[in-house]
Amino acid sequence: MPNTEKIALVPATNLERRVKRQVWALEHDFFAVTAPGLEELCAAELKALGLTQIEPQPGGVAFRGRWECLYLANLWLRTAGRVLLRLKDFRVHNWSDLPRQAMAVPWEVYLPAGGAVRVQVALRESNLKHSGRVAEEILGAAAQRLASLGLEPPVLAEGATDEALTIMARGAGRRASISLDLTGEHLHRRGYRLDPGQAPLREDLAAALLMLCGYDGQVPLLDPLCGSGTLAIEAGLLARGLAPGLGRAFKVEGLPCHRAPAFAHLQKKAAEKTRAQAPLPIEGRDRSAPALATARANALRAGLGQDLVFAKADFFKADPPAWGPGLVVINPPYGKRLGSVREAEEFAARLGRRLREAYAGWRCGVVLYLPNWAELLGLKRTSQLVAPHGGLKVTLLAGDL
Ligand SMILES: C[S@@+](CC[C@H](N)C(=O)[O-])C[C@H]1O[C@@H](n2cnc3c(N)ncnc32)[C@H](O)[C@@H]1O
């Protein structure tokens, strides 16, 4: 039972003042978590949003700015998974550094009184050693801080519930950090893909391939093996200037530090920036009718029903669209997931032959299961990056035909 007498000790106005002073009036250190390999693209996205204090690091991009930067990142980032607020980043001389740092966090401005939290601990050659104790120490510090102010302490979430707020503790060598996940459900879950189809490409990787190709909606685009339509849909979002996070909720919205009017203002501005229609054709093709039905349903849910065209065609037999040349992007079946590796390699070689024969003058982006298959495609002026995808490492390759 909540202790209502104690809760009255910190009146709402007092908490609001604390939030204004300690959150909205200050700059903060944030971290956009990405799949390894996507850091530079994510940094470019943050730069395009007008942010200046940006530093790509392994596994993400550190950035510093006012509270509004968090909302911009949550709303607009296509290549990130989540946005963390760095509460503490410190050197660990001995164990007592952890409770001291954890006690110095003004938890009341971040955690809702009595809210469910989980503490996720990752230690790598850290002199903090015991992850269970790290979690206990942090939760204990937060509980003590809230209780001392007469606020109901947080409760430890049971199991993997989406309701809980995640505090993340990291320890590597002599450094440690405490962060708060302000995103919640992974950013790549844009909400349009209810039916994933077979071997779908994760949305952040699809966006990354398009960015690697320099796609901004100003060239026509074809995905001739579109499956459930992820590449075409991500292209549609980019071409329309649609913020991928516009239709979804974020964890920060339930916290005392949430600045609802600022968030609503940024949502409104994002909605106003959206183009009424993609300026140039975006076409998805597949030889499978069920895949095309899924792609159409996903595109409708993404609000791109008018922008995307889907057609049944076999890539090796059909001619390129009459509107070409443009950008052709392909996520072919890869060995481990569909069929065998050898079949996938032969498929990549056939793709290369067909691309060179029928798509000369096009720009091309391909997802490859093995990096040396790039030779099979024979692209010129290539750029590439490697990123994890469903337990594999895939190569995103961009170049000219
Ligand atoms: C790996 S899936 C593509 C997944 C897609 N990127 C997504 O996110 O859903 C490969 C797709 O290629 C299609 N496909 C295979 N051979 C094809 C061909 N010769 N012509 C057209 N489509 C083909 C399959 O039907 C399948 O949907």
Image: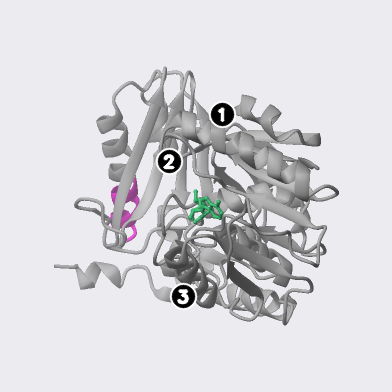
Looking at marks 2 and 3 on the same chain, the residue that comes earlier in the sequence is marked by 3
Toward the front, the furthest residue is 317
Indicate how the structure is coloured in the image: one colour
Looking at marks 3 and 1 on the same chain, the residue that comes earlier in the sequence is marked by 3
Toward the left, the furthest residue is 1
Q: Residue at x 60, y 41 (%)?
A: 367
Residue 51 coordinates in the image, percent (x, y):
75, 53
Residue denoted by label 2: 390
Label 1 CB-ligand 1 distance < 8 A: no
User: What's the amino acid at mark 3?
Assistant: Thr
The disc placed on residue 13 is 3
143 is within the stretch colored magenta: yes
User: What's the amino acid at mark 2?
Assistant: Gly
User: What's the amino acid at mark 1?
Assistant: Leu
- Marks 1/2 in contact by CB < 8 Å: the verdict is no
Q: How packed is label 2: few (under 14 Cα within 10 Å), some, or many (20 or more)?
A: few
* Distance CA(mark 1)–CA(mark 2): 14 Å
Residue denoted by label 1: 370
Q: Quadrant of the C terminus?
A: top right
**Which portion, as a residue range, is magenta?**
142-149
Instruction: Decide which of 353, 345 is in the foreground and name it.
Output: 353
Q: How packed is label 1: few (under 14 Cα within 10 Å), some, or many (20 or more)?
A: some
* Distance CA(mark 3)–CA(mark 1): 58 Å
